[in-house]
Amino acid sequence: MNARRRSIPFRVNAAMAVRNENLREAMRNAAEVFARKRTEAFSSTPFDEWRQEASEIKLAVLKDLAGHVDNFAVNATRAGAIVYRAKDSIEARAIVGGILRDRHVQKVIKSKSMVTEEIGLNGYLEDLGLEVVETDLGEFIIQLAHEHPSHIIVPAIHRTRREVGRIFASQFGIDYCEDPFVLTKIARNILRDHFLSAQAGISGANFAVSESGSVVIFTNEGNGRMVTTLPPIHIVVLTIEKMLPNLATLPKFMRVLPRSATGQGLTSYVSIITGKRKGLDTTGAREVHVVLLDNGRSKVLQGEFFEILKCIRCGACMNVCPVYRLIGGHAYESTYPGPMGIILSTLLSGMTATYSLLDATTLCGACAEVCPVMVPLPGLLRSLRETRVARGFTPLTERGAMIAFALAVRSQPVFRLMQTLFHTALPGASKFVRPLGRLPHCRDDHLMSIGCKPYKFVDDFSKRK
Amino acid sequence: MFQERISFTGDIMRVQFFSTCLVDTFYPQTGEAAVKLLRDFGCEVVYPRGQTCCGKPADSGGYEREARVAAKHFIKVFSGSDPIVVPSGSCASMVKNHYPTLFNNDEYLKTKATELAQRVYELSQFLVHVLKAHEHGFQGQGSVTYHSSCQLTRELGVREEPLTLIRSIKGVEFKPMLYADRCCGFGGVFMLKQPEISMALADDKLDTIIASGADTVTGCDHGCLMNIEDAVRRRGSDIKVKHLAVLLAEGLQ
């Protein structure tokens, strides 16, 4: 995440997204399906019990995160992996670039990873002259379209299949086709050659097991397993909060992660990779490199918002967020969109660029209902708004209005005066500040007829009494 | 659970009524309807004159200091031990759930806020659990659908009470809408700060309201209803938007 000087123009982005009919259609179909599948997947399970357990395990890990990371490093090394520590994006990119350059790698294949998106790895490697091929179908599509993921699980969620058909037609010079089955087959054929010719594979990880030094990857398409086993070199980039204490706790996450993410009881593949290929192993990379990235996590851990580090990146909060599913992920201009994304982006990249994202929520609380690790998302969003106010990132007009509010709210006569002024000024003011036109004015016949006058209720009431 | 805290000491129960600033400013008829209901079911209604706003807009916006000013004023105005009835889920939740978290550095006010929280009821909650208004029944006509507002549902856990009341209106057909508990896009100041998103969400909500086939939409929060009303107005739809208090007061026998 590059530091930007200007803030993200969220309202402009959102207004454009709302008018984008293709996007609206894609979002309506996809987010809806995922949210519904999730509900069905948990329908006969003790969800609250499960998420309580998962949350407790994560909280315990966070209490001694540094210890778990150290243990992981020792155990992964013992299992034959080469472990690196990176404090930020720059270091992580340099480490990965260095490994690939030293081994004269020309082509690298990737399985889906948000962390490599966070550090801008693809662009960096391409600048080094490497060919980088995304092998997750969604990632493959957006790489062709030169876009970034708009969802952490379903990166091309913002594209309809008609658009995917057009992208394929123009990129591969083939006839237009919108049948997902045919399009997938085309992608498979193209990817097969890449799988066989790449000299290195890069993946992220869903979890890292401190006790065994293993990395755990949940995938569906099978590309993840090819990326991590076909090329001789496998590089894993993961952030430190992915730690689990031991393999025994993994099933507690196997039951909540796929259900929350895609509504599946279990993903098609769960890979547990413990070091490099050794002894009688018939598969596995001959070199496994693990880059442990901090990129601001340790700092977040010290602060009041540390619970966001429990997040297991399932995307359920996005699928139910009214704002996200209306406008999609690109409007957030951040690696991670939606409720968890607003929080993480704001904490990791500093508020200067991201404070506008804190408006991207109605605080409806739908996200908290579905979070499988009980991150108090609406509470964190509200607290971050407090930080935003404290740091002076709210508009002057708003701060002025709040000063007036604080004066009026402690005295009913003053409050009534404000009400009267507000009512008097509203019709005129809404000509200049258009959103004010959304409030009920006395301009409406039906409101007039029912007596739209300020504090009429109070007066009538006291007269009767 | 509600009766345990409230004891009928005589035929008359005294309640304090918090109209909410939104009702007071834009929808006085809803406040009157709520008072009419409470009186009709045997309550003596006290309207603490100093009342203003619960501070929710400040709290949601991150203006904690200003929210605290509002909370302190509210605590002062609503003294005593009578139950406090509020015709809004989000305002009731503000007082009940958020006030106690505002005073972590002030033991005295924290205790006060926690005591106050025990006395707060959203109107439909009070009508069903304390006054058993649904047993008495109401009269009406036409068809009604119900929007389940966010704080009412998720923070106060009030899901069935409004439906119980609607179903007790004789002559009214209840037509549930799809995704009733989805946010309508109001979000307090959000309605004005992100009007594009807010209007699009309200439009989606109106679609589900129309699809329900009902002629009237009701709810327990005037914020949402105001946002939905704006969508109705923009589209020129003939859907009627009525707060549950108004719907019930019209149906008093």
Image (tube, coloured by chain):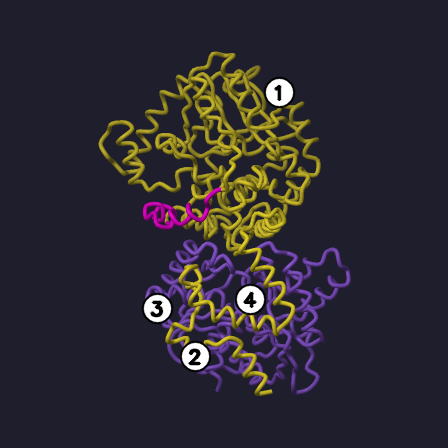
Image location (x, y in percent) of residue B253: 48, 87
Please say whether residue A13 is one of the residues in the magenta stretch: yes
Judging by the rendered image, the residue that carries numbered circle 4 is: B89
Residues in magenta, as a range? A8-28
* Disc 1 to disc 3, C-alpha distance: 64 Å
Find numbered disc 1 in the image and state the secondary structure of the residue it sits on: loop
Disc 2 element: loop
Chain of the residue on which disc 4 is drawn: B
- Disc 4 residue type? Gly
Mark nearest the camera among 4 and 3 is: 4
Query: Measuring 54% from the left and 83% from the top, which residue is drawn there?
Result: A460
Q: CA distance from mark 2 to mark 3?
A: 25 Å
Magenta span: predominant SS is helix
Disc 1 versus disc 3: nearer the observer: 3
* Subunit of label 1: A
Q: Which residue is mark 2?
A: A450
Same chain? Circles 1 and 3:
no
Sequence-first tag of 1 and 2: 1
Q: Residue furthest left?
A: A175
Colour chain A is painted in: yellow
Q: Earlier in the sequence, mark 4 or mark 3?
A: 4
